[in-house]
Image (tube, helix red, strand yellow):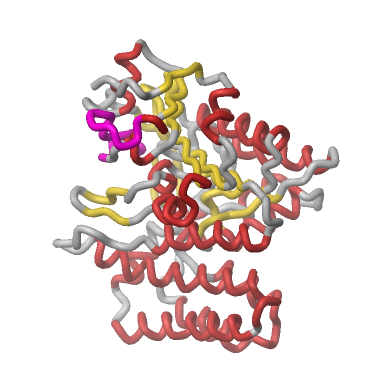
Amino acid sequence: MSLPEAVRVTAADDLSAFDALVGDAHVVALGENNHGIREFGALRARLVRHLVRERDFGVVALESGFAESALVDGWVQGGPGDPDEIARDGFTFRAGDAAEMQELVGGLRSHVAGGGRVRFVGLDLPGSGGSPEPALRRVRESLGSEVDALVEAALKATAGYAAANNGLAPGRYAVLDAEARDRATAALTRVLLRVEALGPRASVERHLALGALRLDEQLREFAVLFAPDPPARVVSSRDVYMAETVRRLREWARPDERIVLLLHDGHAQRVPFTFLPGVTAPSAGTLLAEAHGDDYAVVGLTALAGTTTGLAVDETGRHGITVHPEPLGNPAPGGVEQAVLELGGAPVLLDLRAARGDVGGPLSIRHATTHIPVDVCAGYDGIYCLPQQQTSAFVG
């Protein structure tokens, strides 16, 4: 598998080539083939620093809980807080525990302290996708008696499935009867409707309430996705919510604000993501590309060899998760990694824009320990491919 002739190949450290990819786009996604990878974290920290300091990007938005991220942003703006507590309570899915992420947010704090401007925001569902409680708590803290009784009812109705993450919650949801499921959905809907009725002054709280309801809906979607015979096309409320977060960020920010998104390649890609063989859902990137066209640019990150982050569900671990390294297999035939290997290896940045629509391009990219089918030239504007990736050192 060779790359189409239209693909431009440059050294990975060439920031001018990266700038050409970004162009004038107001929404730029930096992906990665798995989370908690040392080399990806270091590269994204460098690129974010460049975008914030040299290209006037004013929002950094991470694949982590929107509800929880206010704690991180407060710290970035110069507020007090113990870094370990910020890492634990301000992120979901242990996203704040990797050393490289701590370096990134520390750099944002230093930028603000030096007179710069940047906000940090989470894109994602609350509670590592397992519990609406963080979002509901913030709604209640903000709006008090206007929603208190409804929030309390929602917390009670969702207690049967609320868990530390989206690896635990589906099992709890599966044993609930239809009446209990509907009671939870109804209670969360009532919170959202009450907040909506408060109008523009509660726009942030509306998005928090929407995240709680979208989490509930995704648990219903999981039941369909993992059924014996799932449909060919499904919905991911998580991706819908992340795209909606971007829309809200653009509404709340100044008209010319530029936003950099940090999320998984699969969430960022312009085309639907394949969850299971023959089963796809529109990714957040699919929705963003439909909404913004060329004002959305997406750059994926992958590597030829090394280790990747393995996850295990463990309720005693931080966010109910423990991490460990797992070895990567060889690049897949026909994949983008194999195409780079045939070029002579990495590190490289591939500018794929001129090859979009060409036949014969790479048809897969790494996803954790496996490879996901995707027309790479259709799904991405660019790809960084590195020689090695290794699991980050985690704290906590």
Measuring from the top left, give residue 102's x and y in whole percent.
Answer: 65, 39
139 lies left or right of 17: right
- Percent from the top left, x then y, of residue 222? 31, 64
**Residue 134 or 58: which is nearer the viewer?**
58
Residue found 48% across the figure and 84% down from its top: 187
Please say if 158 is above or below 106: below
Q: Find residue 3 and report its image quarter.
A: top left
Please state the extent of the stretch shown in magenta in the rendering. 355-373
Q: Quadrant of the C terminus?
A: top right
Q: Could you say where residue 333 lies in the image, as x and y percent from the top left?
A: 21, 25
Compared with 247, 106 (above or below) is: above
Q: Is residue 366 visible?
A: no
Examine the structure image and report whether residue 368 is included in the region drawn in magenta.
yes
Residue found at x 55% / y 33%: 41
Q: Nearer the viewer, residue 180 or 203?
A: 203
Q: Is residue 379 magenta?
A: no
- Which residue is at the front of the view, 31 or 285? 285
Say whether residue 117 is left or right of residue 232: right
Is 60 left, or right, of 351 in this rendering?
right
Q: Residue at x 28, y 61 (%)?
A: 234
* Residue 267 in view of the camera: yes
Using residue 339 as the reference point, say whether residue 315 is left or right of it: right
- In the rendered image, which quarter is residue 191 located in? bottom right
372 to 132, vertically: above or below: above
Q: Quadrant of the N terminus?
A: top left
Q: Residue at x 46, y 82 (%)?
A: 157
